[in-house]
Amino acid sequence: MGKFSNISIVASFFGLWIVSFFSSKIQIILGFLLIFSFGILHGANDLLLIYKNNSTKKTPDFIKSLINYVLVIILCALLFYLIPWLTLLLFIIVSAYHFGEQQWKELINNYPKWIWNTIFLTYGMFIFSLLFLFHAQEVENIVYEITNVKISKSLIPLLFNVVGITFIVTLSLSYYIYESLRRKILTELFYLLVFAIIFKASSLIWGFALYFILWHSIPSIIEQMNFLYGKLSIQNFMSYCKSAALYWFISIVGIILLYLLLKDKELFNAIFFSFLAAITFPHVVVITKIFNRK
């Protein structure tokens, strides 16, 4: 992330300070506004990324890519409806890997595959488990609303311990074996301390929104613009937003309609998370292909 990390740190603590003046309800609204803006925007150009990634082929098939992309979204939504607990678990695992991949992308093709795959997954899972640990009761309630499964109170601390030990062991081995990784590892450990402070001091939604937007979505948008247009600029950002506008608009309208039509909070939560999962799975595949190509 480079210099942007310093901006993210300042913005994160500013975000903690500014919401101290608002109630929990307002924090939730602000958090969702961030997620619905930059959060959805960062995944709204997947089809353009697919086309660009396949442009080296003699005849990149955009229609085929579009059909496959839509089918994956429909399949994910269907699975969330039929097997919500399993799909929610897969959603967390895939999202965790994606978060780790964004943060540690320099490892790809520069180190053994098992090193970076393990770090990607354990890093992302550690972030989730850290967030869950500080807001265990809220997480338990949300999981029950979505899946109708009541998780044990000891599950989240157990998850944190298992993921934490695995993550520390992996980083320790990497630190010992690869001298070139040592600075990166120490830097990321410092960022995790920042995340812990953010998650502890904020509500569940606002803490996640700060991480998701400042540390994942915006850096991802920057990466995507470099891939699509060759450099970061205001003009390229406007082009990026323009090409993403239709997908973003449809997503936002769909969520608003669901909110207005579904008076049942539990049903809305289930459908909302199924929507997030449905658009996350194909997005992760697209970004992983781009990182591996680079």
Image: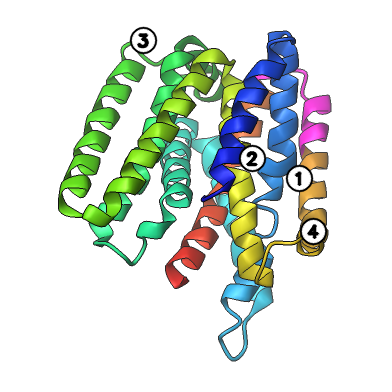
Amino acid on which disc 1 is placed:
Ser
Q: Where's residue 218, x and y in %? A: 64, 47
Q: What's the distance in space between the residues labelled 2 and 4, CA to CA?
A: 30 Å
Rendered image: mark on residue 251: 1
Query: Tag 4: Cα neighbours inside 10 Å, few (<14), some, or many (≥20)?
Result: few
Location of mark 3 (residue): 153
Q: Is residue 256 magenta?
A: yes
Task: Say above or below: 69 vs 24.
Answer: below
The label nearer to you, 2 versus 4, is: 4
Q: Residue at x 51, y 54 (%)?
A: 284
Amino acid on which disc 3 is placed:
Lys
Please tell me which of labels 4 and 1 falls first in the chain.
Answer: 4
Q: Where's residue 197, x and y in %? A: 48, 20
Mark 1 element type: helix
Q: What's the distance in space between the residues labelled 1 and 3, CA to CA?
A: 34 Å
Picture quadrant of residue 17: top right
Front-most of 23 and 236?
236
Query: Tag 3: Cα neighbours inside 10 Å, few (<14), some, or many (≥20)?
Result: few
Query: Tag 1: Cα neighbours inside 10 Å, few (<14), some, or many (≥20)?
Result: some
Rendered image: mark on residue 275: 2
Contact check, label 2 and label 1, Cβ < 8 Å? yes
Q: Residue at x 32, y 23 (%)?
A: 160
Q: Main secondary structure of the magenta part?
A: helix
Location of mark 4 (residue): 234
Picture quadrant of residue 64: bottom right
